[in-house]
Image (cartoon, rainbow, N blue to C red):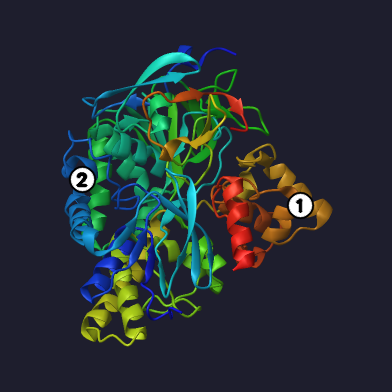
Amino acid sequence: MASNATNHALLHRVAETGRVAVPFTLDGEPASALAGDTVLTAVLTQGSQLRRNEFSDMPRAGFCMMGACQDCWIATAEGERLRACSTFIAPGMELVTGRSGA
Amino acid sequence: MTTNAELQPVIVGAGPAGVRAAEALVAHGLRPVVIDESSRAGGQIYRRPPANFIQRTAATLYGFEASRANAVHEAFDALRDRIDYRPDSLVWNAQAGVLDVLHNPTRTTTRVPHGALIVATGATDRVLPVPGWTLPGVYTLGGAQVALKFQGCAIGERVVFMGTGPLLYLVAYQYAKAGAKVAAVLDTARLTDQIAATPAMLRQPAVFAKGVYFVAWLRAHGVPLHSGVRPLRVTGDDEARRVTGIAWHDGREERALDCDAVGFGYALRSETQLADLLGCRFEFASMHRAHLPVRDAAGRASVEGVYLAGDGAGIMGADAAEWAGERAALALLADRGVAIDTARAEALERKLEGLTGFRRGLERAFPLPQDWAANAPDDLVICRCENVTAGTLRQTVVVNGADEMNRLKALSRVGMGRCQGRMCGVAAAEILAHATGQPLQQVGRLRGQAPIKPIPIHLAVRAASEGASA
């Protein structure tokens, strides 16, 4: 599977860009987000998916952004699952996109 | 043993309804527990960005609503030390006298006993799926707004907003104002709907004026606005990794446009699962096209000690939520034998009553498309959690004779996925009603089930065994 980082970004920052950088890894590659980003924002400002739907195997990237639709779960390297829209990015997080059933 | 009257009341939700309810309880000497799924109070409409977002003013974030948003935030900040505030906390189960609450950051669940309970759980977007709606880059209108307000991000570089409802033009305006490219606004309502609704809308002239302003502003800034559209499909690239465009029917012919993101929705739907778990009686409300928990004018539910306020009990908007939150708190106090300002309580009820005509006007100006179910193709995914299509639902009706929502769920798995029907429930009910030839109210509603949102499984097991041994 192609690395997420090579894909186009879904989200585009239009405000509040003067925040402190937060290092994390995305599919094993070093990446950088901004403090106060959700995991969803951190990933989708540089890639186009969070996980794959376990029934259709299609990529998913969230939908409601308010903790209701459960579409934005993402896996960590340790196998933990996070709801990306309501979890803030933290330094050193190791996020893995494209996991089915994450 | 602590009696119910000695326990502090619990408020679920810290949007405009929850904050005003808390304020009224504190003013009468109580110290309510306020449980908020978000990390900061304000709810969805007045959602506050993280504290280190300092570049935008309230006027930028909330527009015409800035003074109201500020007032709710300031009210909450003044209460902060006089309430037991539990942010980042999800009520995932509710029974008489006790709530199960998951604290998200620590992944721990606790039991919160309650004497009386004010349920102010708010709403999410009302969704009618369109082919392609599961593509990355398609979000709800509310979601598109959260991305901007809460994270300073646009959902794409060339965004189409589609559907109907007050949020449609508001979000398009906010995006354009923030410098994002809005490729088009596609409204399923017809201009004639909006003209017919004008007299009712004028009952709230300020709200009406805002709507007119957004439309005029968008037009003046060259954003194409189309009304009376029938959405056909969101198209994606070959690998379904991104949005490439959108197609719709304009009444005469098919039209299409390139875009890289779509925000869509059809007004809002209430979050009623907690009221359901608490055993509240529901009734079909034709104006909302939904089964809603019954409440009296003061907000009392059918279950003693349970009060309902805000959009979670029927979509009436943020101003109504503030009034209903305060009114419900006054009812709770009066039921405890506390002396309240009855003139204030009556004034709040009059204000809420006065909104009904305007609310009907809104429904007329932005009607849910009546032909949606008839036009939904068989391969349209209705349930995005479990990939259940409209064709499967229709087949379940024909083959298994499903004529009620919970039976349809059991047989087709629609609404059984992680979102518990929040995204698909409205659409599934419309499909079922159409396929069986029944009026919508006859097909019933999906019953709420604990946990009302996914929680780590070991926590649910532990809480259940604690409950059994208690």
- Percent position of residue B235, x then y: 54, 26
Tell which circle, 1 or 2, labels the residue nearer the N-terminal end.
Answer: 2
In terms of depth relative to the viewer, which is nearer, B286 or B239?
B239
- Residue B302, placed above or below residue B20: below
Residue B375's image quarter?
Answer: top right
Residue shown at the point (62%, 56%) measured from the top left: B429
- Percent position of residue B150, x then y: 31, 39
Q: Are marks 1 and 2 in contact (CB under 8 Å)?
A: no
Residue shown at the point (18%, 36%) measured from the top left: B56
Residue named by callout 1: B411
Q: Is residue B82 left or right of residue B11?
A: left
- Subunit that carries the residue with mark 2: B
Asked if marks 1 and 2 fall on the same chain, the answer is yes
Spatial separation of the CA atoms under disc 1 and disc 2:
46 Å
User: Which part of the image, by quadrant, shows the C terminus of chain B?
Assistant: bottom right
In terms of depth relative to the viewer, which is nearer, B281 or B456?
B456
Residue located farthest toward the right when viewing the structure as drawn: B399
Residue shown at the point (58%, 57%) measured from the top left: B463
- Percent position of residue B132, x then y: 57, 32
Q: Is residue B196 left or right of residue B219?
A: right
Name the kind of residue labelled 1 in the image: Leu
Crowding near pointer 2: few (<14 within 10 Å), some, many (20+)? some
Helix, strand or loop at label 1? It is helix
Crowding near pointer 1: few (<14 within 10 Å), some, many (20+)? some
- Subunit that carries the residue with mark 1: B
- Percent position of residue B469, x then y: 63, 66
Q: Is residue B367 at least partly visible in the picture?
A: no
Residue named by callout 2: B63
Q: Is residue B108 at least partly visible in the picture?
A: yes
Q: In this view, does B199 lie to the left or right of B286?
A: left
Name the kind of residue labelled 2 in the image: Gly
